[in-house]
Image: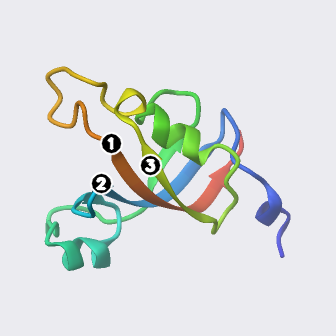
């Protein structure tokens, strides 16, 4: 085991994460994994399927997604349900406003600066 295997994601870290995003009820709307995209009918040949990198604390992703990553370790997986107020808001112009989202996350790397 490397020394990195026991570090947990914290504010300031850059976390690489694979994800599948679904609506409550199970319909997928986005994923970083090619096999999932093909299985769910979301596959786009032009897309580069790889883990996304999120700098924790930088506000790059919705609040609930970022909060879910805090404390996760490399290779850890979890599923989180994110209410509208921690996603795209209860109302507004965003097409996902008012929706509760479910994400399955798997951390592939943590870079500490």
* Closest to the observer, 74 or 77: 77
Does residue 86 appear to the left or right of 24 in the view shown? Answer: right
Q: Secondary structure at mark 2?
A: loop
Say which residue appears at 16% left-offset and 66% top-offset: 42
Q: Secondary structure at mark 3?
A: strand
Q: Secondary structure at mark 1?
A: loop
Residue 71's spot in the image, x, y percent? 70, 47
* Closest to the observer, 97 or 42: 97
Label disc, if present, on residue 24 of the rendered structure? 2
How many numbered circles are shown? 3
The C terminus lies in which quarter of the figure?
Answer: top right
Tell me the distance, in whole angstroms, between the alpha carbons under discs 1 and 2.
6 Å
Which residue in the protein does label 1 denote? 100
Say which residue appears at 52% left-offset and 39% top-offset: 66
Tell me the distance, in whole angstroms, between the alpha carbons under discs 2 and 3.
8 Å
Scheme of colours in the image: rainbow
Can you say whether 93 is above or below 11 in the image?
A: above
Tell me the distance, in whole angstroms, between the alpha carbons under discs 3 and 1.
7 Å
* Closest to the observer, 65 or 46: 65
Residue 30 figure quarter = bottom left
Can you say whether 78 is above or below 70 in the image?
A: below
Which residue in the protein does label 3 denote? 81
Does residue 100 appear to the left or right of 51 in the view shown? Answer: left
Can you say whether 44 is above or below 100 in the image?
A: below
Q: Earlier in the sequence, mark 1 or mark 2?
A: 2
Residue 61's spot in the image, x, y percent? 41, 36
Does residue 109 appear to the left or right of 82 in the view shown? Answer: right
Q: Are marks 2 and 3 in contact (CB under 8 Å)?
A: yes
| Residue sitting at the far top | 92
Q: Earlier in the sequence, mark 3 or mark 1?
A: 3
Q: Are marks 1 and 2 in contact (CB under 8 Å)?
A: yes
Residue 101's spot in the image, x, y percent? 34, 47
């Amino acid at each position: 085991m490397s020394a990195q295997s026991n570090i947990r994601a914290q504010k300031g870290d850059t976390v690489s994460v694979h994800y599948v995003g679904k609506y409550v009820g199970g319909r997928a709307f986005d994923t970083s994994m090619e096999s999932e995209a093909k299985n769910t009918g979301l596959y786009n040949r032009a897309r580069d399927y790889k883990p996304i990198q999120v700098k924790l604390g930088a506000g790059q992703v919705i609040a609930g997604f970022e909060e879910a990553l805090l404390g996760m370790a490399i290779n850890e997986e979890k599923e989180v349900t994110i209410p509208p107020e921690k996603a795209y808001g209860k109302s507004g112009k965003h097409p996902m406003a008012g929706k509760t989202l479910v994400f399955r996350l798997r951390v592939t790397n943590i870079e500490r600066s």
